[in-house]
Image: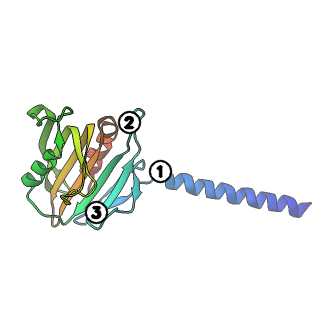
Amino acid sequence: MKVLIFRTLAASFLALAFAVVAIAQEGKGTVITIDGLKSVTPAEWKEEPPSNKMRYAQFVLPKVEGDAKDGEIVIFKGLGGSGKANIDRWKEQFSTNDGGKLGEKDFKITEIKVAGKPTLYLDVKGAYKYKAAPFDPNSKTVLMENSRMLAAHVDANDIYHIKLTGPAKTVEKYRDGFEKWLANFK
């Protein structure tokens, strides 16, 4: 009888210890480093292995109620092009929801600092011209209406492109956390 009680207590203790560790790990984000400076992502961002060699890191952001798709954050490291050229290219990935050309009201470009480095920051809304393989001329474009992209071109020792893309409501839910994460590199 004493052995049974001891085994039950031991099993209960182990289960509790594993639960405490799981809860502690659940609240942690991922550390991302830019030029030796680090910032921890919000815990709700779900890191996944980069889907191709061009990606430095990527995260899924669970969709909000009513949206059909999750949001995505992708970080690219070491790609070229000037800040202006990349911002212009990213704007071209959007049209108005009815397929027209974007107007000044559809995007905003600001200058910020990320890891102490000059950064151009784009906020663009409309229909995202999604291509699974963006540099493949044979890749089919899918128009995803009511989308939004927050994108940063960071001029560090390496150039970093950091993009949050997805349905507009989902992107809005994560916008504050994304902007605080960018500002917190120390």
Query: Percent position (x, y) of residue 120?
Result: 13, 50
Residue 128 at least partly seen: yes
Q: Which residue is mark 3?
A: 55
Left or right: where 31 falls relative to 128: right
Alpha carbon separation for disc pair 1 and 3: 25 Å
Give the amino acid type for the residue marked by disc 3 in the picture: Arg
Q: Tag 3, which secondary structure?
A: strand
- Cβ–Cβ under 8 Å for marks 2 and 3: no
Q: Residue furthest right?
A: 1
- Identity, as a three-letter code, of the amino acid under mark 1: Gly
Q: Circle 1 sits in a helix, a strand or a loop, which is it?
A: loop
- In which quadrant of the rendered view does residue 177 lie? top left
Q: Give the residue number, with chain letter if any, for mark 1.
A: 27
- x and y percentages locating residue 10 in the rendered image: 76, 61
Q: Nearer the viewer, residue 83 or 24?
A: 83
Please report whichever mark, 1 or 3, sits nearer to the chain's N-terminal start: 1
Q: Amino acid at mark 2?
A: Asp
